[in-house]
Amino acid sequence: MSALSLPPLPRSPGVAHRGHLSERAAADLDAILAILPEEADDALLAHLPHAERWRKLRALAIPAGGAVRSTTLANARETRAVLGVLPRDASAFETLALAGRMLREAHSREPERVALVAPARNGAAAGALGALLSAALADAFELPAFRKPSPRPRRLRRIELVDGTRLDLPYIEAAASGNNVARFLTALPPNVLDARSYRRFIAAFARRHRLAARWLGEPALERLGAGAFLAVSRGNAERTAGIAHLAYRPRRRRGPPDVALVGKGILFDTGGTNLKPHRAMLDMHTDMAGSAVALATLAALSRLRAPLAADAWVAVTENSIGPRAYRPQEVVRAANGTTIQVIHTDAEGRMVLADALALAGRTRPRLMIDFGTLTGTCVYALTERMSGVFTNEPRLAETLAAAGRASGERVWNFPLDADYDSDLESKVADVLQCATEAKGDHILAARFLSRFVPAGVPWVHMDLSSAVRPGGLGDIRTDVTGFGVRYALELLLRTRVLDTLEARQ
């Protein structure tokens, strides 16, 4: 049993609309954050309280697009005024990054009540205000900590949107909540989030979000022939591993899912028999980030009552070292009958995803998307600023990139050409688990996984090289970024990838 219990998810601050911000109202706020286009003039600041202070800030910040400046307003509360200057033609990522820097500037005051404003009257203003709100909801969220009792710092409890009626507030809140859930789970220590506690969390999470849920433990997976997953879980000290299957259905909707979300949930990765060195093993409690993204995305779809049916398949296990741990040169059979020659036990992520994909594929979804912190080579190729995507439907390449640009969670589409399979040819099995050399391993891993996707089913694989980045990414200031939830919602609900697939049939 874990010595520490899994803490509850923190609550999000309340969000309210305000049509106008007077000096009297400002005196009740700890901070006001205003985001202004680079090309804007002082007239846009006239309606802010203590307008002359804002004009001086702007004079300090212009012409440096992307600059953040702050001052204190002349009221009893000494309200912090933070001005961000949005560069001309700023991308969604640049807008989020600016919003994140503005929240960091205000964070030192430990604000409890803030107002967010984007004075411009153009299409970019709503995007800028939405980015500020996303950053505020992320900044207010407390990642789990296990310190001795001490005076808690003040936390953000109320966010006021000045003239924010043009925002799609439910969507922004659902995306931010999903990102927070993904970060919360990924940050948990491995003795807190073990397979037993993760199973309990998933069951409670499913009830809270009105999702159907079932747990396929090791006996059930043996009956289903999931030998690739079971090879990895074999080294665990306890027989608690399994694959969770959750489902969201709109009202009056039955039948197969429109989309299946598949997540890698390696709760701690020692590397197995091919043991990792210290530095490579240190943060391997985050190797379950893909499972957190799949769960959080499904919950966000339910929260938004999205008009599409969705499943999540979450492969939950450790990759442990021990007398029963799987070894190089073993041959195992996956759930779709494919035999795999094991080469390196630290390539366990593709093993558990293989069976999860094969099982999800039996439901014949219109689209499959898997998420996993799968390869170091993807990090070497992109750093942690972007994640890699692959697809068996080449015509989706631009759609995938567009969703990254629009969401601010940037991706790069890698090749998936069939000739890479020559590096995975086995003399004793249907396929090698991986090559003996690491070059191009992110591409070879995707080619390996493609064998477990049923023919004719469109599939997207995301290698989560951005799941953890020192110092955060975009509007996220924590090392654990929650990357993937915002992207998936953009792809499914705004880019409408399913409609794209239907139109191209």
Image (cartoon, rainbow, N blue to C red):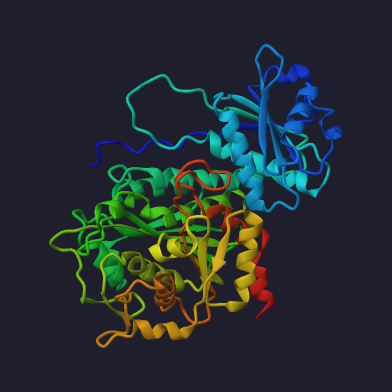
Q: Nearer the viewer, residue 43 or 152?
A: 43
Q: Most extreme residue toward the top, as rendered?
A: 76
- Relative to 458, does residue 200 appear above or below in the rendering? above
Instruction: Return the residue found at the far bottom.
Output: 427
Q: Residue at x 35, y 71 (%)?
A: 438
The part of the image, by quadrant, that contains residue 494 is bottom right
Residue that appears at 42% across and 70% down: 442
Q: Is residue 218 visible?
A: yes
Left or right: 74 in relation to 3: right
Residue closest to the eye, 129 or 51:
51
Residue extending furthest right? 43
Instruction: Please tell me which residue is depicted at 45% across the width and 45% down the height of the picture.
Output: 479
Q: Does residue 246 appear left or right of residue 197 in this picture?
A: right
What is the x, y in percent for residue 62?
Answer: 75, 38
Instruction: Give residue 107's position: percent from left, percent from top.
Output: 56, 29
In this rendering, would 42 be left or right of 341? right
- Tell me if 47 is positioned left or right of 60 in this view: right
Query: Could you tell me residue 122's position as x and y percent?
Result: 82, 46
Q: Say if residue 13 shows up in the picture.
A: no
Image quarter where the N terminus lies is top left
* Placement of the C terminus among the 4 image quadrants: bottom right
Q: Which residue is painted at 50% across and 45% down in the image?
A: 472
Given the current orientation, which residue lies at the most extreme left position? Answer: 323
The relative height of residue 433 versus residue 45 in the rendered view (above or below) is below
Give the number of callouts: 0
Q: Position of residue 100 (x, y in %)?
A: 59, 40
Classify 300 as above or below 216. Answer: above
Write down the quadrant of residue 49 in the picture.
top right
